[in-house]
Image: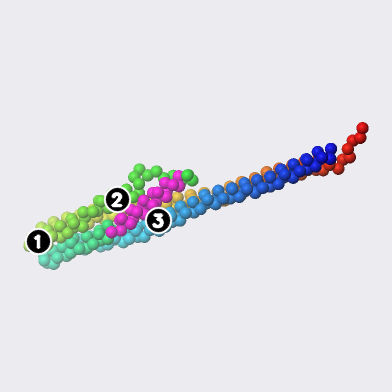
Amino acid sequence: MRLLGVAVMLVAVAFGIAAVMAGSELRSAAERRADGLDQTLAASATALRAADDTVAIVVSSIDQISSGLVAVEDAALESIRTIDDAENAVGKLADISGEDVPRIVEALQEAMPALIQVADVIDSTLGTLSIVGVPYDPEVPFDESLTRVAASIEDLPDQMRAQAIAIGEVAGGLGRIADQGGELIVEIGVARVRLNEGLQLLRSYRETTESAIASVEAERSVLEGSVVDEQTAISWLTAAVVAAQVAVFTVGAVLAVRPAARG
């Protein structure tokens, strides 16, 4: 009986130690798994914030360019209204068409490749966040949309300069000058509309990016709570197993100290 009691005690100790070690490993595994996912989410949030900051700068730049086009358009209208001096009007319109507007549009064209790269990062990052429930399924990818905007303004500088040559060749005729100025205003209006379309697109993607960042941060908070709950459950389970082994150990101790029955 004593040997049986000792054996039961050893088994209880072994199972108790195994339960503690297993519980510790399970808690560590849960923490490692949560840390890995949290790092992925944190990296995604950082990439989205960086992209959003870049888009915000571009939005501000396009807004300023659009305001500049409005000023140029007003100047062109003023030139037509004050067309008494034909040569002066021709010079102003030629400068506006051949220098001011092309320079503004070319500044935007230079910024577009970097913006398209940022758009591709945004699309890729938002796409990977589908694993945490962030909805993102646009009909046209962000970078493709901006590529279309870039293509739509590609020929504008040359068109403006060609218009400037036509205006500069005007030798006289206030009616013809006014017509050329009217065409220039139309071209400026087209450029402004295209820029505003791009601006609205950028703002809509900023809203999507900000929503995605909020979703990522919410998921990180949920993840933190879930790993604590999981570790707590493991701790309670480990404690229950250890308590059961204490009971078994107690039975073994009783058997070990009980005197053997005599015949």
**Gap between marks 2 and 1, in whole Å?**
35 Å
Q: Nearer the viewer, residue 126 or 89?
A: 126
Mark 2: which amino acid?
A: Thr
Q: Quadrant of the N terminus?
A: top right
Q: What SS does tag 2 mark?
A: helix
Q: Is residue 122 magenta?
A: yes
Which disc number belongs to residue 56?
Answer: none
Which disc number belongs to residue 51?
Answer: 3
As drawn, is 16 to the left or to the right of 55? right
| Image location (x, y in percent) of residue 116 | 33, 53
Predominant SS along the magenta part = helix
| Residue hosting label 2 | 147
Q: From what the image shows, is residue 23 above or below residue 183?
A: above
The quarter of the picture where residue 260 lies is top right
Q: What SS does tag 1 mark?
A: loop
| Image location (x, y in percent) of residue 177 | 12, 60
Q: Quadrant of the C terminus?
A: top right
Mark 1: which amino acid?
A: Glu
The quarter of the picture where residue 236 lies is top right
Q: Residues within 10 Å of mark 3 (few under 14, many from 20)?
A: many
Mark 3 and mark 2 lie on one chain; the one further toward the N terminus is: 3
Q: What SS does tag 3 mark?
A: helix
Q: Are marks 2 and 1 in contact (CB under 8 Å)?
A: no
Which disc number belongs to residue 169?
Answer: 1
Residue sitting at 48 percent across and 49 percent down? 215
Residue sitting at 31 percent across and 51 percent down? 146
Mark 3: which amino acid?
A: Ala
